[in-house]
Image (cartoon, grey):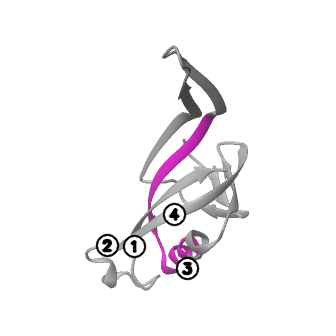
C-alpha cells in the first residue's frame, strides 16, 4: 500500500498509520402479527473507516476543517466516495518540537462514513 492512494477533496494525504474499514447493512425490522420478522433492507454495505495519521500542521488544519463540513469527496484506493468526516482528534507527537522543517508533527484520527 505504498503511494498516494487517499485523497479528500483532491488533497492527497499521507498513508495512514492505522486504518480500519467496516461494512454494515442498514435495515428496518418489524414483526408481523404471527411473530415473523419482516425485514426491509434500506442499504447494503454502507462503509465506515477509521484513519490515524501523522500530519504536518498544514494537513492537520485541512483535516480539521473537513470534519466541520457537511460532506466531502474521498478517493480511496482508486474508488471515489461521498463521505462525511467526523470524530476529529489530535495529539502533538512527543519530541516533534525539535523538527526544523515544520512547526510540530501531529497524530490525528478521524472517522469517515460513506453517504
On residue 93, the disc is: 2
Q: Where is 99 relative to 48, above or below? A: below
Does label 1 or label 2 sit earlier along the sequence? 2
Residue found at x 39% / y 72%: 90
Mark 3 surroundings within 10 Å by alpha-carbon count, few (fewer than 14), some (14 through 19), many (20 or more): few
Tell me the distance, in whole angstroms, between the alpha carbons under discs 1 and 2: 5 Å
Q: Nearer the viewer, mark 4 or mark 3?
A: 4
Distance from the alpha carbon under mark 3 to that under mark 2: 15 Å
Separation of marks 3 and 1 at Cα, in angstroms: 10 Å
- Disc 4 + disc 3, Cβ < 8 Å: no
Look at mark 1 in the image and give the residue it sits on: 106
Give the class, few, some or many, for how many residues have Cα within 10 Å of label 4's Cα (few <14, many ≥20). many
- Relative placement, left or right, of 70 versus 95 is right
Q: Position of residue 108 (x, y in %)?
A: 42, 66
Q: Are marks 1 and 2 in contact (CB under 8 Å)?
A: yes
Work out whether mark 3 precedes mark 2 in sequence or the reverse, and give the earlier one.
Answer: 3
Dot 3 or dot 1: first in sequence order is 3
26 left or right, relative to 21: right
Residue indicated by mark 4: 86
* Mark found first going from the N terminus, 4 or 3: 3
Q: Nearer the viewer, mark 1 or mark 4?
A: 4
Q: Position of residue 73 (x, y in %)?
A: 72, 58
The residues colored magenta run 45-64
Q: Secondary structure at mark 2?
A: loop
The residue sitting at 58% across, 33% down in the picture is 28
Q: How many marks are shown on the rendered structure?
A: 4
Question: Which mark is on residue 5?
Answer: none
Please report the residue visible at 66 percent of the width from the left and 58 percent of the height from the top: 7
Camera-side mark, 4 or 2: 4
Q: Vertical placement of 24 versus 32: above or below?
A: below
Q: Which residue is mark 3?
A: 58
Amino acid at each position: 500500500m505504498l503511494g498516494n492512494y487517499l485523497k479528500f477533496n483532491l488533497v492527497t494525504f499521507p498513508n495512514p498509520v492505522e486504518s480500519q474499514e467496516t461494512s454494515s447493512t442498514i435495515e428496518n425490522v418489524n414483526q408481523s402479527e404471527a411473530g415473523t420478522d419482516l425485514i426491509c433492507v434500506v442499504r447494503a454495505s454502507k462503509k465506515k473507516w477509521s484513519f490515524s495519521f501523522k500530519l504536518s500542521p498544514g494537513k492537520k488544519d485541512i483535516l480539521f476543517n473537513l470534519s466541520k463540513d457537511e460532506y466531502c469527496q474521498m478517493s480511496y484506493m482508486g474508488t471515489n466516495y461521498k463521505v462525511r468526516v467526523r470524530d476529529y482528534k489530535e495529539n502533538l507527537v512527543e519530541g516533534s518540537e525539535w523538527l526544523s522543517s515544520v512547526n510540530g508533527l501531529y497524530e490525528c484520527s478521524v472517522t469517515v462514513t460513506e453517504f
